[in-house]
């Protein structure tokens, strides 16, 4: 039997997933069951698009429930690092793009909490992996589809 993947996340993210699972298994599941019941009342199921849509929605719901259960069962809780001498999960890192001479600040998080739009980068991403364990002043080279990118670590909070 193969070992399941572990999903790094904070305690807060795990609680969010548990709450979402309860919602999907209670409120949302009842809503979808009601949609199916109403669609059945329209008669012949072979030409009933409402029934087909409701069954499709039910399939999506069960798929989402299974996905969240898997995430919860295989969660690996990570605590933010208190150290500021090297980069770890929970670190806020200011880097300077050496080509563009632009500074940006990122937070290194587990894969389940990554959101580039708000500058949260997964430790599993190429950029996140490249930054892990680096120290202030280090030069980080990241291989990207556009070529090699170089950053200098300016600050670790």
Image (spheres, rainbow, N blue to C red):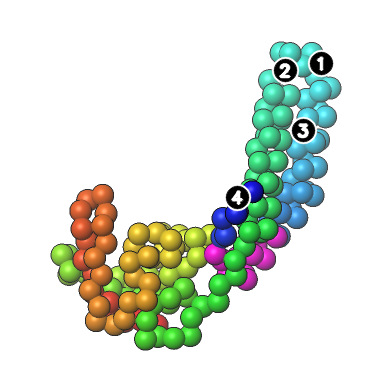
Task: Please give the residue where the numbered disc 4 appears in the rendered image.
Answer: 2
User: The residue tagged with tag 1: helix, strand or loop?
Assistant: loop
Dot in front, 3 or 4: 4
Dot in front, 4 or 2: 4
Q: Main secondary structure of the magenta part?
A: helix
Tell me whether circle 4 and circle 1 mark residues in contact (CB < 8 Å). no
Residue 103 seen in the figure: no
Task: Please give the residue where the numbered disc 1 appears in the rendered image.
Answer: 43
| Circle nearer the N terminus (1, 3) | 3
Residue at the (37%, 65%) spot, across then down: 129
Tell me whether circle 2 and circle 1 mark residues in contact (CB < 8 Å). yes
Question: Could you tell whether 124 is left or right of 68 in the image?
Answer: left
Task: Please give the residue where the numbered disc 3 appears in the rendered image.
Answer: 35
- Seen from the viewer's position, the closer of residues 141 and 90 is 141
For the residues labelled 2 and 3, the Cα–Cα distance comes to 12 Å
Percent position (x, y) of residue 85? 37, 86
Task: Please give the residue where the numbered disc 2 appears in the rendered image.
Answer: 48
Neighbor class of circle 1 (other Cα within 10 Å; few <14, some 14-19, many 20+) is few
Stretch of the chain drawn in magenta: 8-18
| Circle nearer the N terminus (3, 4) | 4
User: The residue tagged with tag 2: helix, strand or loop?
Assistant: loop
| Circle nearer the N terminus (2, 1) | 1
- Seen from the viewer's position, the closer of residues 124 and 153 is 124
Residue 3 seen in the figure: yes
For the residues labelled 4 and 2, the Cα–Cα distance comes to 42 Å
């Amino acid at each position: 039997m193969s070992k399941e993947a572990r999903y790094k996340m904070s305690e807060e993210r795990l609680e969010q997933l548990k709450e979402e699972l309860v919602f999907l298994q209670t409120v949302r599941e009842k809503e979808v069951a009601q949609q199916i019941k109403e669609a059945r009342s329209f008669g012949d199921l072979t030409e009933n698009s409402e029934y087909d849509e409701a069954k499709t929605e039910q399939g999506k719901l069960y798929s989402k429930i299974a996905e969240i259960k898997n995430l919860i069962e295989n969660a690996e809780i990570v605590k933010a690092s208190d150290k500021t001498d090297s980069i770890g999960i929970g670190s806020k890192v200011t880097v300077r793009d050496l080509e563009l001479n632009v500074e940006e600040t990122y937070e290194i998080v587990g894969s389940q909490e990554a959101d580039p739009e708000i500058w949260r980068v997964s430790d599993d991403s190429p950029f996140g992996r490249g930054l892990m364990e680096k120290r202030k002043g280090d030069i980080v080279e990241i291989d990207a589809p556009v070529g090699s990118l170089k950053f200098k670590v300016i600050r670790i909070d």
